DNA sequence: AATGAATGAGAGTTCATTCAT
DNA sequence: CATGAATGAACTCTCATTCAT
């Protein structure tokens, strides 16, 4: 039993290693610009083994997106608070935190949104993500008493996406903390 | 002389046809997802001739970026006005207009910004573009009398980038005109 | 001892399961078109275990051929009769019966005969089979009093091979029983 | 003009070289057992060039079959004679001649008939060929005054297919000429 | 005895680039 | 000037075989 469990853990661990290697490379070089060989090498395995854990390169991308979805759900739940002000504040703070800690994740998701047409599941993910965040933001801005919450939610979400892009361009020079604070002062009391 | 000039024009014309074909295809299918054959066919010439006008596929991308730069300079000059309010208004309006009329251009530039590491000239272009717009916006907001112009310029440029992404995701459903007006009411008096 | 015997039987049984799975798949998909994984799955065992019972995929094919040879010997013995007329009749009837009941066997053997050059043991098997049947038929036709038994044996064996091919092409529409009777009327009194 | 024609000829020539290389290899090693690299090497070209002349490996097989069909039509037309005895005689003689001169053709067609299920166009070809020859033979045997022409046509066509297989097995030792004569004495007066 | 993770070679295919014409 | 035949490297993916467990 012990051994079996350890082995299973090992397998899951390896799956994750491949997944994250792919994630990192897709984010920096693009999906088409990344070869399965590169992914395998980055994960420290042979090319062929990749296909034991994932059906195809496309499947790898799909699984990454699924991972993002699942992770997001958990994250959103953990951020929830009855007080809309606190919830909103946390949402914004969390977004900046992810840019800091997992810039590849944000980069990949953002660039996938620009290649919306290639695979249907990308388009679905993109629209889903867009709608989820937009509705959540509008609701919160509404509760907080913001006038014209619909338009404002649109601006706020766009702003965050834009910050992600700009951070990606200028890197460490971008004043993440300062910008975060400034946005908070505008939207959270 | 006459003939030589006409021939030269002809050559420039053909160069442009190749360049625009590539631009269109890169924007819709991605750089890696587009083959030189496709570009040549779209431009109505042979594969081999492409290499008379451009050194390589990478060079083609570089020249597209150069074209963007040059075009931007001209556009910015044409939008200039002594009155910062009018200049700012025109800048924002022009941005939305380009999203409407040349969505591929915006899409290509935005997605290139996310693959900053692949080629050095992409990174340079991205930083250059970012700094240019940021400084211009800050200056104008300053003149207009906006408090905290630096932070505000950051938000405004991020907002515009974000709008471009979101339009790419939801397409025709995105309320471009409404958003444009809303932004104008906030930043232009 | 008892246990050892039962275990040995068990082993032989498993060997047969692998062999027959391979036989079936080789016949329907071809040797090159069948993977060792498929064979293992069809036999209900793991890929690795296949290599405990057989040295290689090629060896598997060789053992199938050996199985055919052994089975044929037994079959021929069981069909034997002192009366050449009865023996001949049985031989022909048995051939048609095998087409009906084990079309895969016939198909595999026939198609292997056409790829004579790939492995030496295929060529040997093919020639051996050809000679065996030809000599037997000639002998029987001779005893039955057929003039020009040599040439006639050649035709008869060719005829049977041809029937196998044609049945494979048209399938159920092929009039096996009718053809069998017709051949019998020509060669058996 | 001259040059263009010569070039076109050259291209057709090269296409044929690839086609015949593939034909030869498919016949001796089977379709699955032959790689595109092998075909290219046999044709004296690079692997990639194969795909300029043929869409895929499958297309190569399809074109071979089309070539067979076209060639057969021409051959049949050239063999025709108003006298059924002469026509029949020529048909049989031509079959033996092809075995002698183009054994790979016969071998490939025969082995394809055994892999009828893999691609639809193979099945169509096989059934078409079978029906064409069967009907033609029956008609001729009928005109010649053979009793039970239907059954007899079946035997005759099967016989010829069988001869092809047996020649493939024993090669030069097979008495083609003798067998041909013997068949002729039985079916042609 | 039995598994299936792991490898590496090779499959079919595409494509940037060159070059003879 | 212009073509597209030709190449070779790299692509995604498969599979026979091995081996630690």
Image (cartoon, coloured by chain):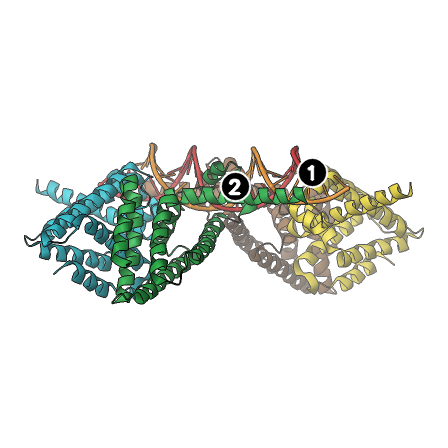
Chain colours: A brown, B yellow, C cyan, D green, E red, F orange
Quarter holding the C terminus of chain B is bottom right
Q: Do the residues under discs 2 and 1 have CB atoms within 8 angstroms?
A: no
Q: Mark 2 lies on which chain?
A: A
Q: In which quarter of the view is residue B177 placed?
A: bottom right
Disc number placed over residue A36 in the picture, else none: 2
Q: In this view, does F10 lie to the left or right of C170?
A: right
Q: Position of residue B81 (x, y in %)?
A: 92, 52
Q: Residue furthest right?
A: B82
Q: Is residue C104 visible?
A: no
Q: In this view, does D74 lie to the left or right of B146?
A: left
Q: Where is residue D108 in the image (x, y as percent from the top left)?
A: 38, 48
Which of label 2 and label 1 is nearer to you?
Answer: 1
Q: Name the residue under label 1.
A: B56
- Identify whether B82 is placed above or below B126: below
- In front: C56, or A156? C56
Q: Is residue D152 left or right of residue A13?
A: left
Q: What element carries label 2?
A: helix
């Amino acid at each position: 039993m012990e051994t079996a469990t350890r082995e299973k853990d090992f397998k899951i661990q390896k799956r994750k290693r491949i997944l994250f290697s792919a994630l990192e490379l897709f984010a920096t070089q693009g999906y088409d610009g990344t070869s399965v060989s590169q992914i395998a090498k980055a994960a420290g395995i042979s090319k062929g083994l990749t296909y034991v854990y994932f059906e195809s390169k496309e499947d790898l991308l799909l699984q990454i997106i699924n991972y993002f979805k699942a992770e997001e759900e958990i994250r959103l739940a953990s951020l929830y608070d009855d007080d809309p002000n606190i919830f909103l504040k946390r949402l914004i703070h969390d977004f900046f935190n992810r840019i800091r800690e997992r810039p590849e994740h944000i980069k990949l998701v953002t660039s996938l949104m620009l290649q919306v047409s290639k695979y249907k599941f990308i388009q679905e993910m993109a629209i889903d993500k867009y709608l989820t965040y937009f509705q959540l933001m509008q609701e919160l801005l509404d509760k907080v008493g913001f006038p014209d919450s619909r338009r404002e939610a649109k601006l706020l979400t766009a702003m965050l996406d834009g910050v992600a892009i700009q951070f990606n361009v200028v890197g460490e020079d971008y004043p993440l903390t300062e910008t975060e604070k400034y946005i908070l002062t505008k939207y959270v009391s």
